[in-house]
Amino acid sequence: MMNDSAEGRDTVRVERTMRAPPERVFHAFLDPDLIQQWIAPGDLEIDRVTVDPKVGGRIVVFHSRKGVSTGSFEGEFVKIVPNLELVYRWAFVGTEPEKGEYFDSLVTVTLRPAPGGKTQVTVVHEKLDDLRRGAPEIYAQVVWGWNNVLDKLEKALTGR
C-alpha cells in the first residue's frame, strides 16, 4: 500500500499478470455474469450486480455474508477506454448509508498486453482517506481485498 501524503490521499496499488488477453479481462470488469464470479472478497457472497457500462453509467454490487446483507459497492464510470482502462468512482456503502456508512473513492484499472497472450493489470484505488477515518476495519483490508478478488478473477477467466 502506498500513501500519497503530499495530496492528503491514501492510495493503494495492486498489480497482477493475468493469463488472459486484455479484451477478456476488460470484459470481466463490465459483464454482470462475470463480475458475479469474482468481485466478492473473502467469504462475501454477491446477491445482485447491475452494470451500465458507459461513461456516466453505474455499477452496483450487493454483498451478503451467510444471508445477511453487508452493504454494497456503488460506482459511476468516469472513463472507459476499451481493453485499456476503466476509471470509476467507487463507494463502499454499509447497511446504513443514511447514518454515514458511505465512503467514496476512485478506482483506475489499467490493462496492458503482456507476452504469451497475458495481461498486466494495475488497480490504483485512491481517495481512501474517508474510508480510513470512518471504517478503519474495512480500510485495513483494501490491499488484501483487491488481491483476493484478482485471484478470483484469474480463476473465472481461466476456469481454474
Image: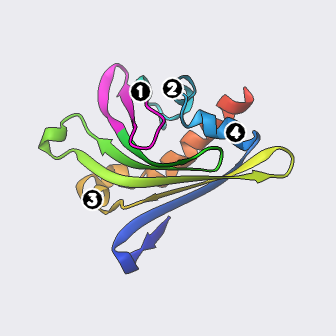
Disc 3 from disc 4: Cα separation? 33 Å
Who's the residue at 34% across and 19% down the image?
Answer: 67
Q: Nearer the viewer, residue 67 or 114?
A: 114
Q: Nearer the viewer, residue 145 or 108?
A: 108
User: Residue 57 appears at what percent x and percent y?
Assistant: 40, 37
Q: Residue furthest left?
A: 99
Callout 3 secondary element: helix
Res 136 label: none
Q: Is residue 157 visible?
A: yes
Callout 4 secondary element: helix
Q: Amino acid at mark 1?
A: Thr
Q: Residue furthest top?
A: 67
Q: How is the image coloured?
A: rainbow
Q: Amino acid at mark 4?
A: Glu
Q: Amino acid at mark 3?
A: Asp
* Residue marked by disc 4: 23
Q: Nearer the viewer, residue 65 or 150?
A: 150
Res 32 label: 2
Res 50 label: 1
The secondary structure making up most of the magenta span is strand
Q: Is residue 148 magenta?
A: no
Ranked by sequence position, the earlier of labels 3 and 2 is 2
Who's the residue at 51% across and 26% down the image?
Answer: 32
* Residue marked by disc 3: 130
Give, as a single range, the part of the protein colored magenta. 51-73
User: Residue 76 appears at what percent x and percent y?
Assistant: 38, 43
